[in-house]
Image (cartoon, grey):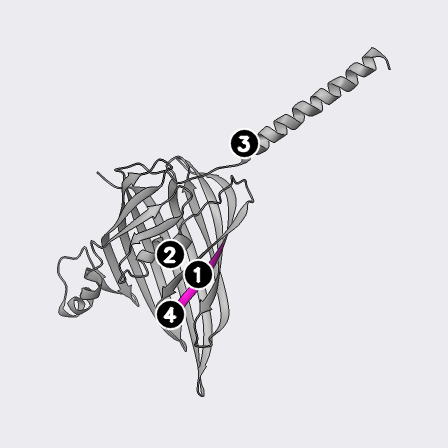
Amino acid sequence: MCRFTRGIRIGAVLYLAILGTLMDSSKAFSQQALRWKFTSGATWRVATEQEISTSINNRTKTVSQSLSMDWNIVSVEVDGTAIIDQLVKDLQVQIDGVVVFDSKKPSRSDAEEKIAGRFQSIIGQKITAKHTPRGEISYLDAPESTPDLLRAQAPESLLLFPDKPISVGSSWITEATRTIDLIGKLHTTNTWQYVGLEPNESKKLHRFRVTPSFQIDDESQRELTRQEGAGNVWFDSDKGRIEKSEIIQAVDWKRTEGDLQIVQKYTTKTTSRFQDAAP
């Protein structure tokens, strides 16, 4: 073999080796080890809008709730895990389009005052939570009276990252169980998928698609006839928190009591936004 030919082959081998290294580096660069970031003493304002529609044999009631909470980051451990006091600031509740409670309204009618009692106790209610950088949450102190809207901040509604770096198309599963009025114990399995970066006017946000599925755990022999769910969560990697989330969940079931068949439908639409609280 002549030196020229040998030189070409050696050059080709070196080129392939360099190309392989660049491809591996590009692949590693494309992977994201996204995590929540907490700073001791900081406060986040979380605004949540939730619409809950319940139907029993085509008789429908819709409850709309607007909730404002402050996440006060009390302390941050060495590994980035934070102790957070979640404090309810404001709440408005509408039933079938009629405002029945508004914490910002200084005076109420006699009819509103009768309803207000059950909601007034929520204002100032505090939940202390432990939140890891991956997004795992354990409630250290959550009163039994905590309503569903506050529990919208529960683990199945927030973003839990896998323990490995992710790239576009990566998917993983999270599971959670909670008890909901009219449903009972509901098991939720969320399938997450990383969609990728979406440039915003002033920032780049990572978008995640979430698809929930459900299982009801009770002894009433209900038959689950429909379960649907879809949502998106946008994560700001610079601030290390969710920017906003939009999630819709629907569960329909039927059961028989004697000669009567009961058809029930439960749908929730939840939107949340995070921002720095005003000083």
Q: Name the residue carrying label 2.
A: 270
Dot 1: element: strand
Eye-nearest disc, 2 or 3: 3
Whether residue 263 is situated above or below residue 104 in the rendered picture: below
| Cβ atoms at labels 2 and 1 below 8 Å apart | yes
Dot 4: element: strand
Rendered location of residue 187, percent (x, y): 45, 62
Residue 110 as seen in the image, left or right of residue 229? left
Q: Name the residue carrying label 3.
A: 29
- Nearer the N terminus, badge 2 or badge 1? 1
**CA distance for labels 3 and 1:** 35 Å
**CA distance for labels 2 and 1:** 9 Å
Residue at left offset 39%, top offset 53%: 155
Residue flagged by tag 4: what amino acid is it? Thr
**CA distance for labels 2 and 3:** 34 Å
**CA distance for labels 4 and 3:** 47 Å
Residue furthest to the top in view is: 3
Eye-nearest disc, 4 or 3: 3
Rendered location of residue 254, percent (x, y): 46, 76
Dot 3: element: helix
Residue flagged by tag 2: what amino acid is it? Thr
- Nearer the N terminus, badge 3 or badge 1? 3
Give the dominant element type of the magenta stretch: helix, strand or loop.
strand
Q: Nearer the viewer, residue 113 or 39?
A: 39
Q: Name the residue carrying label 1.
A: 249
Residue flagged by tag 1: what amino acid is it? Gln
Mark 2: few, some, or many residues within 10 Å (few <14, many ≥20)? Answer: many
Residue flagged by tag 3: what amino acid is it? Phe
Residue 52: assigned label: none
Rendered location of residue 227, percent (x, y): 49, 65
